[in-house]
Structure formats: structure tokens, C-alpha cells
Image (cartoon, rainbow, N blue to C red):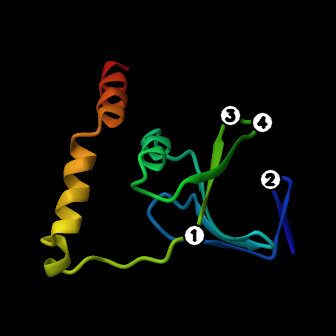
Amino acid sequence: MTNYLGRQWDDLQPAGGESGQAYFATNHEGKFFLKRNSTPFLAVLSAEGFVPRLKWTQRLENGDVITAQKWANGHLFTHEEMTSPRVIDMMQRIHTSRALNILLKKLMRM
């Protein structure tokens, strides 16, 4: 058992990716995806229902922020899936999201 962020984890493994700051973790509450210093878009994507909802966030003493989401199994879409009405609808909702648009404008001013 590993203690990380004040929580007990049965398993804590790197999840891969280019940043090296993503982890797969399990404990008595289930499976989680942990990410250090994720993009501000994650909170909006979660609130809008495009990705699994954030379970918690925690700011570390050094200023880093850790986010946790329930793990969701997924796969890369095939060409046929990418052209399906369901995916097209989701992409349209992402590109017309008022909350995402506001966040993008704020980030562009920085």
C-alpha cells in the first residue's frame, strides 16, 4: 500500500503519456486517473460532461495541483466511429460550448 497525497493507494503506477505526470491508482474507492498540473480545460470538460467528472483536486505545497477522475476504459476511435453521428454531435457540442469558449478567450489574454 502506498501513501500519496494523504491517501492510501493499493496500486499507483505511471499512466504513460508525454508529460510523465499522469498516474493510474486504485484504492477501496475504485480506480482513478491522477494528473499533476492538468490543463485548465479539464475542469470545464468535466463540468460539461465530455470527460469523467473530477472527483477531487488538491494543491500541493509547491503550488502543483493534482486532479483525480474515476478511471474510464477507452479506445482509439476507428475511422467509422469518427464519422458516426454520436461523435459528430459530441465534437459539435465541444466546439460550441460557451464555457470552453470563455476559458479559451481568458487564456489567450494571458
Q: Residue at 22% across / 44% down in the picture?
A: 95
Residue type, numbered disc 4: Glu
Q: Which residue is mark 2?
A: 5
Which of the two discs, 4 and 1, labels the residue nearer the N terminus?
Answer: 4
Front residue (pair 75, 46): 46
Residue type, numbered disc 1: Trp
Front residue (pair 91, 3): 91
Which mark is in front, 2 or 4? 2
Whether the residues at callouts 4 and 3 have beta carbons within 8 Å, the answer is yes
Q: Secondary structure at mark 1?
A: loop
Q: Is residue 3 above or below residue 109?
A: below
Which of the two discs, 2 and 3, labels the residue nearer the N terminus?
Answer: 2
Q: Residues within 10 Å of mark 2 (few under 14, many from 20)?
A: few
Q: Would residue 83 appear left or right of 37 to someone viewing this image?
A: left
Residue type, numbered disc 3: Gly
Q: Secondary structure at mark 4?
A: loop
Disc ID at residue 61: 4
Q: Residues within 10 Å of mark 1 (few under 14, many from 20)?
A: some
Q: Which residue is mark 1?
A: 71
Distance between mark 4 and mark 3 Cα atoms: 5 Å
Distance between mark 1 and mark 3 Cα atoms: 25 Å
Q: Is residue 90 above or below residue 64?
A: below
Q: Would residue 4 appear left or right of 55 to someone viewing this image?
A: right
Distance between mark 2 and mark 3 Cα atoms: 13 Å
